[in-house]
């Protein structure tokens, strides 16, 4: 069982190794949600996420004999870097098994901390199975990403910091996947301030903890792809579930569109680049998944390890969901001045043309016609509807795509 002493000892062990991350007030999210909102910036943590806290505490708890045999873990992202970093700091041999399709940036980051990286399988489950096979063959210690008391104690140190930084906090929102962060955080906060409310937030595309609470035990679910890949866990931990059931006030889900829009808000308004899972708590607040106002709220921004090759797509998706980017096609007469006429209408409507594609051959294009594909930068959903209605009135057959 966890004790508050375990959390305090974990904090003492990692002093000078792991950052005490800042707590930043957000006027934007306070205004939009009707609450007083603060953000715990674990995206600024060593290795780019909270995971290093639990990994470091777990590895510090190993005996000399266990350390000599080395550690092994399976991950496609943050856990890999956390274990590799902690092992490197303590000069412990480390092997990380990652799926073959893991982003190159994360593979190279893990290697840079001194870990041996083994690429195996097409998905995480195959990498995990192979890691356990190697663990048995080599006698190494397996470092679980969440279902381990020492890992949970390490994550719980966020609660100690938060209690000092914002002692009068009313509500804490935290992303949840396997449950290590939420379990450790909720346990710690409830020991220090029983009146605080703690909620978990997950993607509706992979609602593992919601299913566990409904069935009164962890169950495997069928999950869809999600932008919040850091919390895309099909079956939460057995240990973490017990603590979440006891100490957490509730778990809510957010939609993919809400996550991507919140990521864009954070980037534009707060100049913070966070991964999808880290945006979930603020998405829940922004889209009123929890019925409270005028509360002092802290949201845990769990990480910022976004693959650079995905950043532009994430921004584009957020713009689309916010009604600030749209594409459409229409057919015009293939005569001089017809394209200019269409562009003049769009200019008068104050939309910004990002790209145009003009073609004379197509299934719906008759001789003497041309099909035009537009990409427009718009203001909001109302602006898109205004453009659509004006073009219809002007006689254009318009097909919008979102």
Image: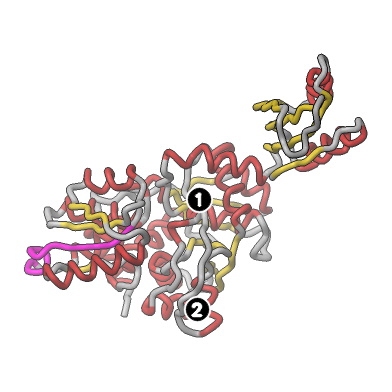
In whole angstroms, how far apart are the C-alphas of marks 1 and 2?
Answer: 27 Å
Rate crowding at label 2 as few (under 14), some (14 to 19) or many (20 or more) other CA atoms within 10 Å. Answer: many
The mark found on residue 105 in the picture is: none
Compared across the picture, whether 124 is left or right of 222 comes to: left
Q: Which residues are magenta?
A: 64-75
Compared across the picture, whether 397 is left or right of 57 comes to: right
Rate crowding at label 1 as few (under 14), some (14 to 19) or many (20 or more) other CA atoms within 10 Å. Answer: many
Along the line of sight, the residue nearer the viewer: 298 or 379? 379
Q: Quadrant of the N terminus?
A: bottom left
> Where residue 281 sits: x, y (%)?
54, 57
Along the line of sight, the residue nearer the viewer: 156 or 255? 255
Number of numbered markers = 2
Residue 201 seen in this snapshot: no
- Callout 2 secondary element: helix
> Which of marks 2 and 1 precedes in the sequence?
1
Q: Which residue is at 17% across, 51% downward?
A: 88
Q: Which residue is at 60% across, 44% downward?
A: 317
Q: Is residue 161 above or below residue 323?
A: below
The mark found on residue 212 in the picture is: 2
Q: How is the image coloured?
A: secondary structure
> Where residue 309 sits: x, y (%)?
44, 39
Residue 389 seen in this snapshot: yes
Compared across the picture, whether 357 is left or right of 110 comes to: right
Q: Marks 1 and 2: which is nearer the front?
A: 2
Q: Are marks 1 and 2 in contact (CB under 8 Å)?
A: no
> Where residue 254 sits: x, y (%)?
60, 61
Quarter of the view holding residue 240: bottom left
Task: Give the residue pinned by disc 1.
Answer: 39
> Where residue 349 sits: x, y (%)?
82, 27
């Amino acid at each position: 069982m966890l004790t508050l002493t375990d959390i305090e000892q974990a904090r003492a062990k990692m002093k000078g190794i792991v950052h005490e991350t800042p707590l930043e007030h957000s006027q934007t999210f306070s205004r939009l949600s009707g609450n007083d909102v603060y953000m715990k910036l674990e995206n600024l943590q060593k290795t780019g996420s909270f995971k290093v806290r639990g990994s470091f505490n777990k590895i510090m708890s190993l005996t000399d004999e266990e350390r000599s045999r080395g550690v092994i873990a399976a991950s496609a992202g943050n856990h890999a870097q956390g274990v590799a970093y902690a092992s490197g700091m303590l000069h412990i041999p480390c092997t990380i098994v990652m799926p073959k399709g893991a982003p190159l940036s994360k593979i190279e980051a893990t290697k840079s901390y001194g870990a041996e990286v083994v690429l195996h399988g097409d998905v995480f489950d195959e990498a995990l199975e192979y890691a356990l096979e190697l663990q048995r063959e080599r006698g190494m210690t397996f470092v679980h990403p969440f279902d381990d008391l020492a890992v949970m104690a390490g994550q719980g140190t966020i609660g100690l910091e938060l209690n000092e930084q914002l002692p009068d906090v009313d509500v804490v929102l935290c992303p949840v996947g396997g449950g290590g962060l939420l379990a450790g955080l909720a346990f710690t906060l409830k020991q220090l301030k029983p009146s605080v409310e703690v909620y978990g937030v997950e993607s509706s595309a992979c609602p593992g903890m919601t299913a566990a609470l409904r069935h009164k035990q962890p169950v495997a679910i069928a999950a869809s792809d999600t932008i919040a890949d850091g919390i895309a866990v099909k079956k939460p931990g057995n240990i973490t579930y017990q603590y979440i059931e006891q100490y957490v006030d509730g778990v809510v889900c957010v939609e993919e569109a809400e996550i991507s829009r919140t990521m864009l808000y954070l980037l534009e308004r707060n100049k913070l680049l966070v991964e999808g899972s880290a945006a979930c708590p603020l998405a829940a607040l922004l889209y009123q998944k929890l019925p409270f106002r005028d509360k002092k709220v802290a949201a845990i921004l769990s990480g910022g390890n976004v693959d650079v090759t995905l950043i532009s797509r994430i921004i584009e998706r957020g713009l689309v969901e916010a009604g600030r980017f749209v594409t459409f096609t229409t057919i015009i007469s293939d005569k001089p001045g017809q394209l200019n006429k269409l562009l003049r209408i769009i200019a008068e409507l104050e939309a910004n043309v990002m790209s145009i594609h003009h073609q004379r051959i197509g299934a719906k294009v008759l001789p003497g016609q041309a099909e035009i594909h537009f990409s427009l930068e718009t203001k909001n959903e109302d602006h898109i509807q205004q453009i659509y209605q004006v073009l219809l009135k002007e006689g254009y057959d318009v097909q919008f795509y979102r």
